Image (cartoon, rainbow, N blue to C red):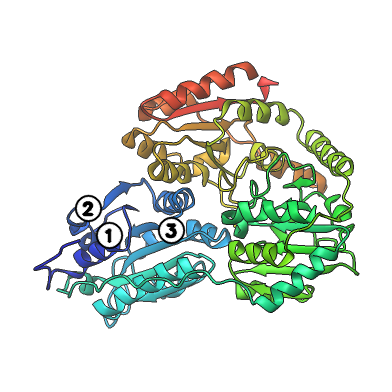
């Protein structure tokens, strides 16, 4: 961008220009008196701004945009309550390793100690609890350096959200133009000696197993080639769905959280874990179930994950794609010697489908109807709802990055605004929001944003009039169900009030046509589904 003569413009204008120079095209935000100086420069910098209805919507939209495009999402909010409202989405982005940069204004240091507008005791420290780092710019040069720290960090390390706060007087003051962007270092491959040792272990194994998480989402080609070369079985986490092709006869799927998966994992004599923390929300049990004699190898970009691992024999630090490529090359040509049996893998999958059907009766037919109606390239953003809990296990993804679920931080209200962000980022491809009746109400004002943008966005709402998962948990704990039934609005009438369309299929066969009409519409369509369908 040519910004000749720009010396001395307010820092808010220069920040907008610096974002554009670093590849940003869209900013999600809500303007206020405290951050309006950033808005002074948006048009000049050629940045598109998407106005949300609440800062939670801002953050979730930036998150969805980042997941859909592979580029950082930018959220712009005011000091105090604006940043506080943004912290829930930032926590979700932290949990799911999403590149979001939050830019907020802040009150200047040295002012009166109390009673200033939007004053917080420690705004920077509050945001630090849900970000990789939270820093306050001291001057213009420091602000530009923090921007480069954010963008290079997203490219070089495990992506996590960051927070940059700018004092209001600094935003208003004249500033020099930002220097050219700092170029990130290309992702590194693991140590070659460790790779060769790992390849030897895997190549000699009779029952090698790969467990792949969201950190392997960009390495599907390499992962599929490696399991084929080894004849290995595989599991994926919810975030790793699609890394292994659903039709692979030795692929167990995204059933890591099924108790029976421990028995299958325990059959492996060598295990390679790639880009997966094997956290509580991956397993819902204390341990994966490795055989004590199994040789375990971990490949991960995050040094904290590797440092905390006391079980793995080898810990390979590096990028998933580069690491899997190096392992495949170290193995060399040859036929697999593995002894996995496709019939046993298929039987395990069938048992787990039956368990889902028993736990959540009637949901699998709804899932099948939705799946049959969606184009293969459709991207789904789901919320914390029983329909999604079943779908993230039972709905195989054809490719990675096509289904996004807030499984880590577990935020309600995620699906609608995240889907809006994704639809903004990939307007030529289908995007779907899948929410429960209660979670949708957390961020339902963002329906107005979708109408304003004219997005052909289907918003599928599972309306069962209750917090079904919580009621089931209370009953299992022998607690009399309390506060788990709510009065819902007329969702279709609410959609019309915002100028959106609505559909209310009365049978499973009507779901497909409703979705087709929604994708052709010139605005969002709320599609209300109820248990009466089955």
Dot 3 surroundings within 10 Å: few (below 14), some, or many (20 or more)? many
* Disc nearer the start of the sequence (2/3): 2
Q: Nearer the viewer, residue 193 or 454?
A: 193
Question: What whole-number distance in Å separates the C-alpha atoms at marks 1 and 2?
Answer: 7 Å
Question: What whole-number distance in Å separates the C-alpha atoms at marks 2 and 3?
Answer: 25 Å
Helix, strand or loop at mark 3: helix
The residue under label 3 is: 86
Residue at x-position 63% and y-position 56%: 222
The residue under label 2 is: 46
Question: What whole-number distance in Å separates the C-alpha atoms at marks 3 and 1?
Answer: 22 Å
Relative to 487, does residue 192 appear above or below in the rendering? Answer: below
Whether the residues at callouts 1 and 2 have beta carbons within 8 Å, the answer is yes
The residue under label 1 is: 20
Note whether residue 125 is visible.
Answer: yes
Counting from the top left corner in percent of width and height, residue 89 is at 48, 56
Dot 1 surroundings within 10 Å: few (below 14), some, or many (20 or more)? some
User: Would residue 343 be found to the left or right of residue 258 on screen?
Assistant: right
Note whether residue 237 is visible.
Answer: no
Quarter of the figure with the N terminus: bottom left
Helix, strand or loop at mark 2: loop
């Amino acid at each position: 961008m040519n910004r000749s003569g720009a010396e001395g413009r307010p820092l808010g204008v220069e920040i907008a220009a610096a974002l554009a120079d670093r590849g940003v095209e869209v900013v999600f935000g809500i303007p206020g008196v405290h951050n309006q100086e950033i808005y002074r420069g948006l048009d000049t910098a050629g940045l598109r701004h998407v106005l949300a209805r609440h800062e939670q919507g801002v953050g979730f939209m930036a998150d969805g945009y980042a997941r859909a495009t592979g580029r950082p999402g930018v959220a712009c909010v005011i000091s105090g309550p604006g940043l506080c409202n943004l912290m829930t989405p930032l926590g979700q982005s932290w949990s799911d390793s999403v590149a979001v940069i939050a830019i907020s204004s802040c009150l200047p240091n040295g002012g009166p100690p109390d009673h200033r507008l939007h004053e917080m005791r420690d705004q920077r420290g509050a945001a630090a609890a849900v970000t990789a780092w939270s820093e306050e710019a001291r001057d213009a040069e420091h602000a530009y350096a923090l921007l480069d720290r954010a963008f290079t960090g997203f490219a070089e390390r495990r992506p996590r959200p960051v927070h940059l706060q700018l004092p209001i007087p600094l935003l208003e003051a004249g500033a020099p133009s930002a220097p050219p962007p700092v170029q990130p270092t290309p992702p590194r491959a693991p140590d070659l000696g460790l790779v060769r040792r790992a390849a030897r272990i895997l190549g000699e194994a009779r029952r090698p197993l790969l467990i792949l998480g969201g950190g392997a989402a960009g390495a599907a080609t390499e992962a599929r080639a490696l399991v084929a070369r080894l004849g290995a079985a595989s599991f994926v986490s919810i975030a790793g769905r699609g890394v292994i092709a659903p039709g692979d006869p030795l692929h167990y799927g995204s059933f890591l959280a099924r108790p029976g998966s421990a028995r299958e994992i325990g059959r492996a004599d060598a295990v390679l874990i790639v880009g997966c923390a094997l956290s509580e929300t991956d397993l819902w049990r204390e341990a994966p179930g490795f055989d004590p004699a199994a040789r375990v190898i971990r490949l991960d970009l995050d040094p904290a994950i590797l440092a905390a691992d006391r079980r793995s024999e080898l810990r390979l630090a590096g990028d998933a794609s580069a690491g899997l490529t190096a392992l495949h090359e170290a193995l060399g040509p040859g036929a697999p010697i593995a002894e996995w049996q496709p019939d046993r893998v298929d039987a395990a999958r069938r048992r787990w489908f039956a368990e889902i059907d028993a736990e959540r009766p009637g949901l699998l037919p709804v899932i099948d109807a939705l799946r049959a109606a969606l184009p293969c390239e459709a991207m789904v953003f789901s919320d914390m709802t029983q329909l999604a809990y079943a779908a993230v296990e039972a709905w195989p993804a054809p490719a990675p990055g096509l289904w996004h679920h807030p499984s880590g931080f577990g935020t309600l209200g995620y699906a609608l605004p995240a889907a809006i962000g994704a639809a903004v980022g990939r307007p030529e491809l289908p995007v779907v929001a899948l929410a429960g009746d209660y979670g949708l109400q957390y961020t339902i004002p963002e329906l107005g944003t979708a109408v304003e943008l004219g997005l052909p966005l289907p918003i599928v709402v599972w309306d069962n009039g209750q917090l079904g998962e919580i009621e089931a948990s209370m009953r299992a704990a022998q607690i009399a169900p309390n506060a788990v039934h709510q009065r819902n609005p007329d969702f279709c009438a609410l959609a019309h009030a915002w100028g959106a369309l609505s559909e209310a299929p009365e049978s499973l066969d009507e779901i497909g046509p409703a979705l087709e009409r929604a994708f052709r519409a010139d605005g969002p369509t709320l599609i209300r589904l109820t248990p009466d369908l089955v």
